[in-house]
Image (tube, grey):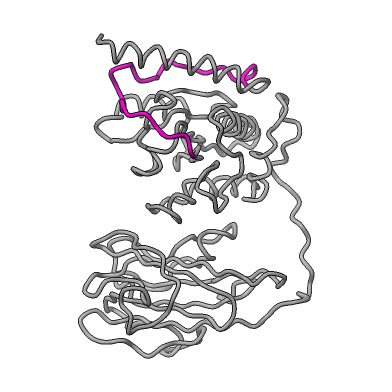
Amino acid sequence: MNLKNKLRWIMAIVTTFLFAVAVGQSAKASTIDNSYALSSNQGSSLRTSNNVVIAHATAVYAPARNVAIFENRTWYSNGAYVQYIVGDGGKIYRVGAEGYQAWGAGSWANANAPVQIELAQTYDQAEFRKDYVTYVNLLRSSAIKYGIPTDVDSSAWRGVKSHLWITNNVWGDHTDPYGYLASHGITKAQFAHDVKYGFSSSGNNVNPTPTPTPKPSTPTNKKAVHVTYALHQKGKQWLSPVKDFGSGSNGFAGVPNSAHDMLYIKVNHGTIKYRVHTKEDGWLPWVHKANKNDTINGVAGIKGHTIDGVQMYYTTPSGETYQQAYYRSQTTQRTGYLGTCADNGSVSGYDSWAGVLDEPLDRLQIHINDNSKY
């Protein structure tokens, strides 16, 4: 073993020891299992900057131990692994070394995250409760250890970040861990609160099925918001703009069974940002303006490149009843609308972007409200 690898191996051992101290009460209940940790000559040898701790969910209902075994075996062939996997009733399995780049969320995230953590998925509510407490405490203690804020998905570039935040602000198409957390009754707001303050070792202060905050039956300050949008038919021209949505051919933007390459969206109140995914380029940058004559800053898309995904986010003016962009799409290869989306996944139970990758988007419907009208 050369000197560099010896030093790296020593650092990994010291990191594990320091982590156990940092976790405190939670670590006493959840010993780190190093059985599937990468050896000193495996994984990336690049150090990270200490800016974010990334929260993932595995997207498969499988034991955490199996996920750790898989990442250990395929870290190089699949090019994917993280530092920790939590599951199996609150256990922690280590794969990658803390402070060294893992391969979990793209180049920027990997370079800035000394710790990335996967939450294994289970249908068992009692098991989830134990997993969730350990997951939250591990995220929180890791952030504290590296001097990273414990705020979740804030607008700042440092803090605890979900994979969805990385998708929305940097790169990618992942939305975890929110869909899985929601399946067990954990909202984004509760998750942020829990990471901010942590749990005692008993975990008795976690409520996996929180009581929703009652909403007024009649909003006291709800404004009518209208959205106008249009698609550009690939190889042809801009189509007529659509306001909100309706029925029949005038109720959506686009041409059935046709591909489109550019999109603009504007609202009469509040603000909206939007972006598209193309078959050729992946997700393109967010657009904040709407001007079909400005193909650089005023529309989403690239002329001649096929749109297969759309995502948007509506911001409600301060002091008004909170509203979202509800939208849905169809593709040239399927009959009927796909699932309804709400902003970029801000409402539990709704999709976070419209479309199916590699299938040209042929029509789009949007409206702004505090509930879906589809």
Frontmost residue, 205 versus 96:
96
* Residue ID at (45%, 13%): 13
* Residue ID at (41%, 32%): 82
Magenta segment:
27-51
- Number of numbered discs overlaid on the protein picture: 0
* Residue ID at (37%, 90%): 240
Residue 124 horizontal side relative to residue 200, left or right:
left
* Residue ID at (45%, 43%): 59
Residue 156 horizontal side relative to residue 80, left or right:
right
Residue 316 horizontal side relative to residue 273, left or right:
right
Specify the quadrant of the image occupied by residue 300.
bottom left
Where does the image place residue 49, in percent across and percent down from the top left? Answer: 42, 35
Q: Is 41 contained in the magenta span?
A: yes
Quadrant position of the C terminus in the picture: bottom right
Q: Is 299 contained in the magenta span?
A: no
Quadrant position of the N terminus in the picture: top left
Frontmost residue, 343 versus 182:
343
Where does the image place residue 258, in percent across and percent down from the top left? Answer: 27, 79
Frontmost residue, 264 versus 47:
47
Specify the quadrant of the image occupied by residue 308.
bottom left
Where does the image place residue 198, in percent across and percent down from the top left? Answer: 68, 34
Vertical relation: 236 (above or below) 23: below
Our reading of the magenta stretch's main secondary structure is: loop
